[in-house]
Amino acid sequence: MQRMSSHRLPVPLDRATRLVNHGPTVLVSATHGGRSNVMAAAWNMALDFAPPKVAVVIDKITFTRGLIESSGHFTLSVPCHAQAALTSAIGGSTGQEIDKAATLPGLAWIDEPASPAPLVDGCVAWLACRLLPEPHIQQTYDLFLGEVIGAWADERVFSHGRWHFEGHEGLRTLHHVAGGHYLLPGGFVGTPP
Amino acid sequence: MQRMSSHRLPVPLDRATRLVNHGPTVLVSATHGGRSNVMAAAWNMALDFAPPKVAVVIDKITFTRGLIESSGHFTLSVPCHAQAALTSAIGGSTGQEIDKAATLPGLAWIDEPASPAPLVDGCVAWLACRLLPEPHIQQTYDLFLGEVIGAWADERVFSHGRWHFEGHEGLRTLHHVAGGHYLLPGGFVGTPP
């Protein structure tokens, strides 16, 4: 199933790191040889501003890892409160056994021409990344680095370089503690940038 | 100034990653040659469960970086809502120009025998780390890896492997967006672990 998120707008690359700066859990997706897959990753962070880069931990047992290594690209999609059950289902299943997009209710791809890897529909931010091959740390620490080549956000909750979740309870980002238990951003402190 | 946080209790190492799993900004401290310093880092993540490991981005211009490379140890302290101004002040000053602990109001060290690097008093979680030297990624990406050798949390807001901020507004963790603007964890979704 493919749909278009009507609220998805491009984010300037020099502000792309702000999409993950506050520490949300992300969904990591990739495509190769006609097969797409997605996994959940709480262990991700920004790595640089210009060009923007990210780091993410991708276990050897994941099916997505092979797709990333073969294709050289991946996407980070930032899921929201309304997708908590979907995020846990994505994290609790493997592409080695099922085609997640064909099996998990609510999981659909967005085809974005600027991203070789698919975006997950219904999320609130997306970062299209080109793998920066670093075989030693990939093998030793399951640590993958990427350069961000495209970024988008749901303009209802992210615009002008900041998050504003007020009035959009279902669109708050998910911050995983353990076992499908997520904290949600509530208030804020400091002047919005 | 040295004080002891009376609510600080050890966290089992197999649950240490839960202290940063939800993506808080951290304070990175280190000591070498009689000099201690601390910096702020939104770009941090867990890297492994057993033994627990973390990754953090430490820019070449920081004074703390030299202390870490010389001593082989660092600590991640997780600051809270009540420390938002202090966290921004730590991030906005450099140990090359000032002795932060002697200059910034509210900044004090906790001496913890199990941690070669000092802990920041008033925070809500602490991870003592041994640097895992990886010169290539340190030089190329400012990316530093550490093995967690000790972990503690404020038992008022973290116990039994989960965060519970209800009733402790000032102890909520800080999730940096940009320019001293932080999101705070509010509610949660899913069954606590």
Image (spheres, coloured by chain):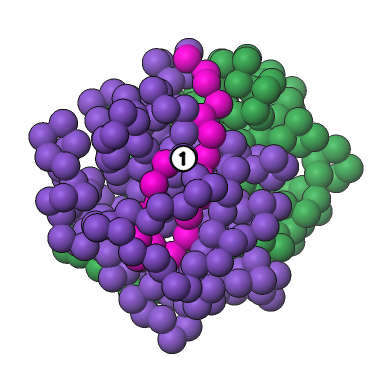
Chain colours: A purple, B green
Type of the residue with mark 1: Pro
Neighbor class of circle 1 (other Cα within 10 Å; few <14, some 14-19, many 20+) is some
Instruction: Answer left or right for B34 relative to A162.
Output: right
Question: From the viewer's perspective, is residue A63 above or below residue A36?
Answer: above
Query: Which residue is depicted at the point 58% across and 49% down?
Result: A150
**In the figure, residue A82 lies in which quadrant?**
bottom left
* Mark 1 belongs to chain: A
In depth, the one of B168 and B45 nearer the eye is B45
**In the figure, residue A51 lies in which quadrant?**
top right
Q: Quadrant of the C terminus of chain A?
A: bottom right
In depth, the one of B94 and A95 nearer the eye is A95
Question: From the viewer's perspective, is residue B30 above or below residue B20?
Answer: above
Query: Which residue is depicted at the point 64% across and 22% down?
Result: B138
Q: Quadrant of the N terminus of chain A?
A: bottom left
Q: Position of residue A153 (x, y in %)?
A: 52, 64
Instruction: Answer left or right for A84 relative to B52.
Output: left
Query: Which residue is depicted at the point 34% across and 31% down?
Result: A32
Q: Is residue A132 magenta?
A: yes
Q: Position of residue B83 (x, y in %)?
A: 60, 64
Instruction: Answer left or right for B27 relative to A58.
Output: right
In depth, the one of A74 and B24 nearer the eye is A74
**In the figure, residue B176 lies in which quadrant?**
bottom right
Residue A151 visible in the shown view: yes
Tally of numbered tags: 1
Residue found at the very far bottom of the displayed protein: A167
Report the span colored magenta.
Answer: A117-135
Q: Is residue A134 magenta?
A: yes
Mark 1 = which residue? A116
